[in-house]
């Protein structure tokens, strides 16, 4: 199989056409960005780490009955996915207060939540991806209220499986962001990536960060943190 024309280039990935109409070729990039592109660096090896980690996680979810756009890993930095139209919402699940929630509500980072919470952010770079309510989403026509029920249920289901996966690796899943898309027959499918770029992952014993906060907050080597996650994923059973 060969890569076709470049259809889209985002901050962290390029999307290419393939010879098959409903399949796309994703190439991960070594670029790291934060604060809506204000902080930017090229970090050699990041593409490989995120591609490998996302491939392992989507395969694990598949084995546990959670479908996604992921078809297969093509190379160290590339994967084949089903074509979907991305729903313009970032679906964030939180198990522990951190990041923007800590800041917005004045709750100390690291405070556990009694039950996971789901938030929706409107995907719009110019607006800085604002937090939106169900009513905002209706006005923006970003998704229907039925879609929101499906997104919420799927996000919480993914959370359940990911908590278990990371627990086996001695890692706490603090929070993460998902994106969903619609296939040509209207089915809502988990899409994008699940990697330390999109999750907060803390060591269970030491609270050491293994995620993009390493880069955002200058806490240490991003590649070393992501490599630790990849190594632990390789060591942990992905079918439990
Ligand atoms: O910044 P905030 O605390 O809202 O992020 C919550 C979670 O969503 C974090 O795991 C973060 O890495 C992820 N996220 C993301 N892409 C964004 C915003 C947040 O992956 N554009």
Image: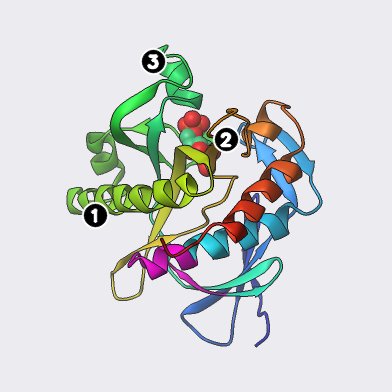
Q: Residues within 10 Å of mark 1 (few under 14, many from 20)?
A: some
Give the residue at x 38% y 34%: 95
Asked if disc 2 is less than 8 Å from ligand 1, the answer is: no
* Horizontal side of residue 90 vs 227, given as left or right: left
Which residue position holds label 2? 203
Residue 3 on the magenta segment: no
Q: Between 108 and 178, which is closer to the camera in this rendering?
A: 108
Residue 175 rendering spot, x and y as whole percentages: 45, 37
Closer to the N terminus: mark 3 or mark 2?
Answer: 3
- Magenta region, residue range: 59-72
Give the residue at x 50% y 60%: 57
Q: Mark 3 against mark 2, which lies toward the viewer?
A: 2
Q: Between 144 and 162, which is closer to the camera in this rendering?
A: 162
Q: Residues within 10 Å of mark 3 (few under 14, many from 20)?
A: few
Q: Residues within 10 Å of mark 2 (few under 14, many from 20)?
A: some
Under tag 1, what secondary structure? helix
Q: Is residue 38 visible?
A: no
Closer to the N terminus: mark 1 or mark 3?
Answer: 3
Tell me whether the residue at label 2 lies in contact with that at label 1, contact meaning CB atoms closer than 8 angstroms.
no
Which residue position holds label 1? 150
């Amino acid at each position: 199989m060969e890569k076709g024309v470049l259809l889209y280039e985002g901050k962290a990935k390029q999307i290419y056409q393939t010879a098959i109409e409903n399949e796309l070729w994703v190439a991960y990039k070594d670029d790291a960005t934060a604060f809506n592109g204000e902080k930017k660096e090229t970090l050699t090896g990041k593409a490989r780490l995120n591609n490998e980690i996302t491939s392992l996680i989507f395969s694990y979810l598949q084995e546990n009955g959670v479908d996604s756009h992921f078809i297969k890993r093509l190379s160290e930095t590339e994967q084949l996915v089903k074509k979907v139209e991305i729903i313009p919402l970032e679906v964030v699940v939180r198990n522990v207060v951190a990041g923007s929630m800590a800041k917005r509500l004045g709750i100390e980072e690291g405070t556990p939540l009694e039950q996971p919470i789901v938030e929706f952010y409107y995907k719009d770079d110019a607006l800085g991806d604002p937090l939106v309510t169900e009513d905002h989403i209706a006005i923006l026509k970003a998704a229907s209220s039925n879609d929101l029920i499906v997104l919420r249920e799927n996000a919480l289901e993914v959370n359940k499986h990911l908590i278990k996966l990371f627990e086996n690796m001695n890692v706490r899943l603090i929070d993460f962001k998902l994106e969903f898309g619609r296939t040509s027959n209207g089915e809502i499918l988990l899409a994008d990536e699940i990697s330390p770029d999109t999750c907060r992952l803390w060591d269970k014993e030491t609270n050491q960060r293994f995620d993009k906060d390493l880069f955002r907050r200058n806490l240490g080597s991003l590649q070393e943190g992501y490599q630790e996650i990849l190594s632990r994923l390789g060591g942990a059973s992905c079918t439990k």
